[in-house]
Amino acid sequence: MKRLMAIGAAAAMSASVSAQDFAVRSWGGGVIDQGAYPNYGQSIVPADLGQVVGLSAGGYHSMALQSDGSVVCWGRNDFGQCNMPDGLDGVVQVVAGHVFSLALRADGVIAAWGDNSAGQLVVPAGLGSVNRVEAGYSFTLARTPGGTLRAWGDNTAGQCNVPLDLGAVDDFSAGRLHAIARRIDGTVRAWGSNSFGQIAVPADIGGVLDVAGGNYHSLVITPQETVRCWGNNLYGQSVVPSGLSEVIAVGGGEYHSAALRRDGTVVCWGANVAINNGYPSNQCIVPNDLGRADMLAVGGYHTMVHAVACLGDTNNDGAVDGIDLATILTRWAQSATKFPNADCNRDGVIDGSDLSIVLGSWGVCP
């Protein structure tokens, strides 16, 4: 599942960090220690998180990448998926699989821990440096600097058989038993299990902006910033809400899907009442006080975001002031991927538009 980037009467809204405390919010996961889809604490965000620059949601655990390159992990730990290796630092990406975890370091080296029953932690010899990783249920995908995709781990449905003619890719994701990728020309390829039609890319889909793999379904963002989805639809997880537009990120869980819109709102669809004999998980009950999100991570039965206090509040301290002005000026024209909080209007570049937002929002956040 792409983890950015997973119902009932007893809501399990997480204990969450306020906007003034870096605003990581999480919900879903059912009831603590109860039912078939319980909450192992994966949606209870640690209160001592530092400044977060990356998130990932696994089957029953969550991960956050802090600005100093350190990693925080919480939730289910029965396979050691939250036992970070000693000395792990300089991390630029975190990825949570079902019950294993990955961290990509700035030098292109992958650290992996947790369940290794299918060899998903065993990085192939000679792989060399990579610039991105993704995790499926029990397999791993990695991209080399040249855009070549490599895969290892569980291959029972051919999900590790990267097509020989795939070519270079610039986006990719993993589901339970399938993988999906966007090639450099924007076209989509998928392989692995097709038990629910999840790799049957619709013929009318041309170039896309983003791809994501859910449990047994797939999602893409079109050039018009709308969402297309196909595959398993038992709980409506493949029925995109009418009118959904201006989408900049999307993810799929076990029985739900979620999208982040350009204005920072989160839309969720799929299982939201009860699944399999009425067990609650509440992964689609988006908090009313969420605020403006700028990161989205979709787990098996929970959803997680990084929510900004208000437009222009780049450091999430509850006010738009000189600190935020300085942030925009010092990061001018730099990568919006590296400094997402400074990209106030989410257009991919830190420029005069972001400066205008800061100046126009000056003062205490509402």
Image (cartoon, helix red, strand yellow):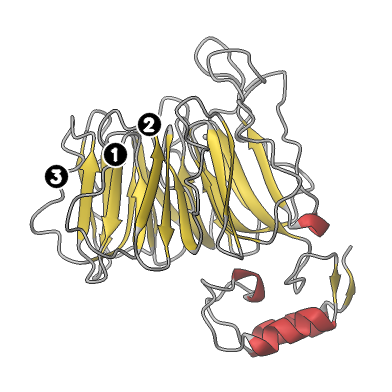
Q: Residue at the spot x=76%, y=37% of the render?
A: 15
Q: Nearer the viewer, residue 54 or 116?
A: 116
Q: Does dot 3 land on a helix, a strand or a loop? A: loop
Q: Residue at the spot x=69%, y=41% of the render?
A: 45
Query: 353 above or below 280?
Result: below
Query: 329 above or below 95?
Result: below
Query: 326 above or below 98?
Result: below
Q: Does dot 1 land on a helix, a strand or a loop? A: loop
Which residue extends farthest left?
Answer: 164
2 sits left or right of 315 in the view: left
Measuring from the top left, give residue 12's x and y in whole percent: 70, 27
Label 1 or label 3, whichever lies nearer to me, is: 1
Q: Do the residues labelled 2 and 1 touch (CB within 8 Å)?
A: yes
Q: Name the residue under label 1.
A: 120
Q: Distance between the residues labelled 1 and 3?
A: 14 Å
Q: Mark 3 points at which residue?
A: 161
Q: Name the residue under label 2.
A: 115
